Image (spheres, rainbow, N blue to C red):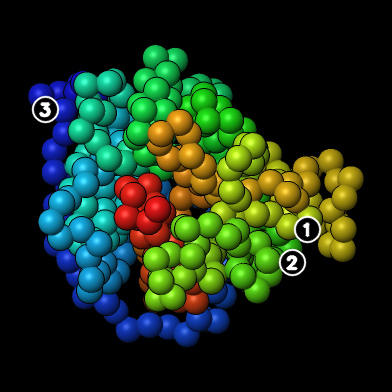
Amino acid sequence: MTGRSAGVERRADGAQRQPSLRCSRLTVVRRCAAAVAALLASGIVFAQRTVPDPDFDASVPKPSYTREHPRVVMDEAHYNYHTAQGRYKPLADLLRNDGYDIRIGKGRFDSAGLHSVRVLIVANALGGEAVPDQTKPAFSAQECATVGEWVRRGGALLLIADHAPFGHAAHDLAIRFGVEMGAGFAFDPQNSEGDPTILVFSRANGLLGDHPVTRGRDESERVRRVVAFTGQSLTIPFGATALMKFAPSAYEAAAAAATRSALADAPTSLDGNAHTEPIGGRAQAVAMSFGKGRVIVAGEAAMFSAQRLTWDRPGRPDVRFGMNAAGNDDRQFALNALHWLSGAIK
């Protein structure tokens, strides 16, 4: 990567925090569902309300890497909504404690900058700080070609693009790996908790795929339940594995308002609703080999975070969502994803 300022990369160091007292799983789910519903109803953007949870336990008792420290670059050169010192600080801390060398990518993608990188993480990139045209790509054609060739020769990419507008911005890079993005707002009235946009992918409901990422290296790393927070849908390229697969009861709306309208208009059936499109059989996360390299594309970003939703109203309790919310294996899912991409899981 060539930097826009002096230095291609810088370290992303941060202090580790201690875990907080936990709320019950049902309480967290209900608060999170109510919070998300309130945000969707009001049109408030998450950036105005969310912060990385300072109490998230990012410790790793048995780090995967103690002798070598694979370099992981977290992209911040594309107006990324999630950054290593922002909403993805808990993820950066977790991976650092697992033995990874975490760096921040400050420049556009080029072959020289990617040469020493084991895993590239790109989360919620945009084509600009204020983008009236949501279809504006976040990456140039040359960057997409460079990343594609780097992966083909043995690199590893975690590409994360949330609900609109992030799917549009990441389209050109995702399509290099055969993934088409729904670019809307996903919801499932049947496989969710408290709110149709709090999506549940589990072994119990059959929506969690069988893959090294979900199996882990032993029983202690086995993923049984992943919770996502809206996001978008993805196609499943030939040869790829759906890590999180949408049920026939899942739908996607072009806008958050359309999601609410569809649920209000069709409380028992959404088939044929003009506001939505069925996405059963599509995925919210896929994993694949690509040449000599590996790729995971995820259509939801909060499950890799540990965020705290705060309110302007005095006395209203904060809400945790992501790896810090009770009742999910999102934390282990994130670790397993990096283990597979970096080669710790074969």
How packed mark 1 is, by other alpha carbons closer than 10 Å (few <14, some 14-19, many 20 or more), is some
Can residue 128 be seen in the rendering of this structure? no
List the residue tagged with mark 2: 190
Q: Residue furthest top?
A: 142
Frontmost residue, 247 versus 114: 114
Pick the front one: 38 or 169: 169
Whole-Å distance between the Cαs marked 2 and 3?
49 Å
Instruction: Please state which amino acid type lies under the numbered disc 3.
Output: Gly
Q: Secondary structure at mark 3?
A: loop
| Residue drawn at the location 84% of the way across and 41% of the way down | 274
User: Outermost residue, left direction?
Assistant: 6
Which of the two residues, 129 or 55, is positioned nearer the viewer here?
A: 55
Mark 3: few/some/many CA within 10 Å (<14, 14-19, 20+):
few
Mark 2: which secondary structure?
Answer: loop
Instruction: Find out whether the residues at labels 1 and 2 contact each other: C-beta distance under 8 Å.
Output: yes
Mark 1 or 2, nearer chain start: 2
Of pointers 1 and 3, the one earlier in the residue sequence: 3
Q: Which mark is residue 166?
A: none
- Residue 205 visible in the snapshot: yes
Q: Where is mark 3, residue-wise?
A: 7
Q: Position of residue 327 (x, y in %)?
A: 49, 76
In the image, is residue 23 above or below residue 178?
A: below
The answer to which of marks 2 and 3 sits earlier in the sequence is: 3
Residue at 53% over, 71% down: 224
Total marks shown come to: 3
